[in-house]
Image (cartoon, rainbow, N blue to C red):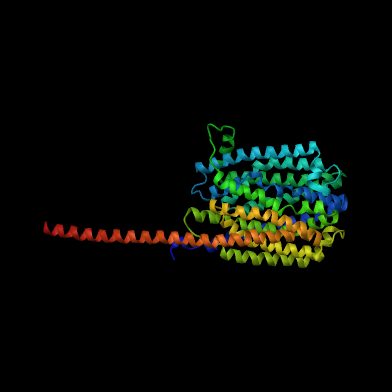
Amino acid sequence: MPRHLRSDGDGLWAAVGYSAGAKILVMGISGVLGIITSRLIIQHFGVGAYAQYGLLSSITALLPFADLGIAAVIINAVAGSDDVKSDGHVRAVITTALRILIVSGSIIAAVGFALFVLGWWPAVLGDGLLAGGSLAAFLCLAVFGLVLPLSVGPRVLVGLGRVSTQVSIQAVVAPTILVCVVTSVALSIPAGNYLAVFSYAASGVSAFIGLLVAARHVRPQIAMAIKAVPHRRRYPGVAVGSVAWPMLLQMLALPVAIQTDRLLLSHLTDGPQLAQYNLASQIFGLVLQTIAAAGITLWPIYAKARSSRRIESPAVPTMWFTLGGLLLGVTLAAISPWLVPYISAGKITLDPALMIGFVVFVTLQAAKYPAGMYMTDKRGLTFQVIPILIMVPLNLGISWWLVGVVGAAGPILGSAIGVLACQVIPNLWYVRRDLAKRRAVLESDTESTDIEGTTDSAGSIEQMLLDEVDDGLT
């Protein structure tokens, strides 16, 4: 097989292993601290405050479109660059990203303020919002909007293939939240309504550190990009729509399809079921975060392979990711009878159907990652739009119905069905066809090169013989 068709399997799995290992370490620390934090919240502020904490903390899951798809542009530009420290295109992409994110963050904060002034937050978030929680909801969005431009740093690190570094930086989040909660408890500060704000502030600290680390690795690109932001005429941006728009459409649709579970439970059930879902989501979220950290490592690998006309197939990673997700999910479900009573201080129990739903969801999320990271070019991102748009009404309808049948387990089971039907199956079908096309094109190019080389060699030998004859006659 030609060299450009071979995969560097060792390098791929090493990168995945480093990222997964870093995430497991961070997850272990964050998980222990998160359990302590949850127990403190439930004991000192109540189950209602814990339910609202989970509800408000998940608002960002409904706003992954906040970067308007620019993350894909940054990662692809950085991963595909031969000299990222001096590449003018990379610097222009970062400048454009900062401008877009500043505007987007400002709009998000303004929308949060408008919902607060108009008194619409209870209608948006449902009964899970406590009295006086509207101000906390606004503050969460305000902090999120302020921090949004800093997310350029983590995206650059992913593009550089330094996912393990990006993951390690996230280790500061859980300790920061715990310190804030412990301080509130120790000083008897009535912070029950504002616990989620601590989460957003901690994420801001992590993003700022990520920006500083990324700036050091690509010096002086980020510093120059920041200086260029206000000077649009002197430093024009770049066109990012071809990659950003399909990514943006996915980001608009996916939260509605996947991340509305808490909103459905908040509107359709009572408080205990929302608290049950929050706790199960916290437990299994540790696995989902590990899968995400390992999966995103594949993005720059596939992007670099495309730029160098080399094929990296996601077939084997898909198999291992699926098995790994299933194993981790089953393991967590097995230890949950001992874990749940400790975290909730015996105040919350989890239904078996809810546990089964999360195991299935975790497995399918793992199965979709390799193919999804392979499909991060313009064609792949565009293909994913229609299935995801279909998933929105499919998931909402199934989840709505299942809430009445199995309670808290309904939304996660509906999400699992949606992921299987509209992401796993369509993406694997696309990848299979795309791999065949790429192999055919590269093999054809290789054969053409070989034929040209043979022709040139034959012509050179013939010319050499003719020259020798001419020299003899002379």
Q: Position of residue 74 (x, y in %)?
A: 57, 46
Q: In which quadrant is the C terminus drawn?
A: bottom left
**Most foreground residue, 65 or 349:** 65
Answer left or right for 336 relative to 224: right
Please name the residue shown 55% across and 60% down the image.
431
Q: Position of residue 63 (x, y in %)?
A: 69, 46
Answer left or right for 38 relative to 172: right
Q: Position of residue 452 (x, y in %)?
A: 33, 58
> Is any atom of residue 281 visible in this view?
no
Q: Position of residue 134 (x, y in %)?
A: 81, 41
Please name the residue shown 56% across and 64% down the image.
315
Please name the residue shown 56% across and 44% down the image.
241
Quarter location, residue 447: bottom left
Residue at the left extreme, as displayed: 474
**Most foreground residue, 264 or 346:** 264
Badge count: 0
Answer left or right for 313 relative to 348: left
**Most foreground residue, 65 or 39:** 65
Q: In which quadrant is the N terminus drawn?
A: bottom left
